[in-house]
Image: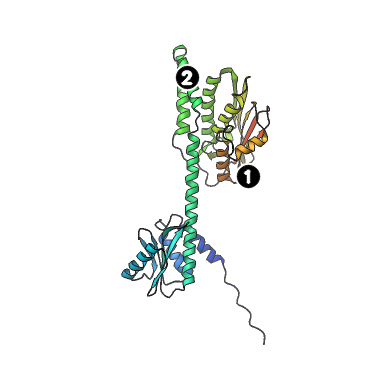
Amino acid sequence: MLPKRAAPPADPLPVLAAARRITHDLMDGLAGAHARRAAHGLRKLFGVPGLGLADLSGSLLWSGRPGPDDLVSKVLEEALRSEEPGAEAGLRVLPLHVRDEPAGALLTVGDVPANVAREAADLVVQALERGRLEASAERAAEAELRALRAEMSPHFVYNALTVIASLVRSDPDRARDLMLDFADYTRYSLARHGEYTVVAEEFRAVETYLALQRAVLGERLRVQVRVAPEVLAVAVPYLVLEPLVENAIRHGIEPRSAAGLVQVHGQAEGNHCVITVEDDGVGMAPERAAEILAGKGSDGGVGLANVDRRLRDVYGAWYGLVVETAVDAGTRVIVRVPRFQPGVLP
């Protein structure tokens, strides 16, 4: 007699898809907008008669057959207080811990094996951990942008206001224009913005900043700004260009005694927008530039590491800053971003 052929394994794709949906629905926590949908998905995925999710406040979402109210309250309270699993009369309660901190509990109703309930609880914990990590990453990114806005050089502010004050009597029209430029610059740098803007706005902020710096540095600073019309509407992360120009002036032009040139160009190259910020200043060792991009520099790269990290986060690892430099040979910083990127909208 031929041996019986083993049954083919069940298709894992629906299971994986269900797990992904549950994870997504729990990203906002056990009290999130889609937590009830996650409870339904968990009950169907693990085939249990009834399943509940409770947060630390005791708020409870049921899917399927609920447990008796008095029994649920008793076992749930004990489990949350002791942080140990509880079971009684067809009701099983498993406390949920995220990074060793209590987060709530998972409840199952019916004759549910302990290992099945544990697997369901583990899936919930993994989803909650992922949600917290992504929320932390978003908060970190927002904090980085706030820090970048706060990096406006006090030295530059003092010098700009001093120059404006000196012109109030001798050239009031020029003083007024510069004061308006200063107001525009601070408004763009410090005001609350969305995550993205367009190349046109970034170049406008750069031109304002350069006008103020030319007033401060006089003949020591020459500038050239050129941007192709086809990239003006390209969406980019907010405040990615001005820090590069500021770095070129502070650490490229200001340290040298002779006059220097800063060039800012934007153009299209196929499906990419390429922006270069170049100075003919003092430059630096390539090893030093690598340290700055790695976040190890505190005196030679205003915002460079921040901009590099944000570009990589938005577009991927291939889209960080490219820095070409050498001692006494100036510095060129290149930004290359897709002209069209899903999810990147001003």
Residue 255 position, x and y percent, is 60, 24
Quadrant where the N terminus lies?
bottom right
Residue type, mark 1 in image: Trp
The outermost residue toward the left is 70
Q: Point out which mark residue 162 bears.
A: 2
The image position of residue 184, as x and y in percent, is 46, 28
* 259 horizontally vs 148: left or right: right
Depth order, front residue of 241/346: 241
Front residue of 69/229: it is 69
Indicate the secondary structure of the residue bearing disc 2: helix
Residue 289 x %, y %:
63, 35
Q: Is residue 141 above or below residue 228?
A: below
In the displayed structure, does residue 25 sit left or right of residue 302? left
Residue 89 lies in what quarter of the image?
bottom left
Q: How is the image coloured?
A: rainbow
Q: Is residue 234 visible?
A: no
- Asked if one can make out residue 238 in the rendered structure from this viewpoint, the answer is yes
- Residue drawn 58% across the image and 27% down it: 249
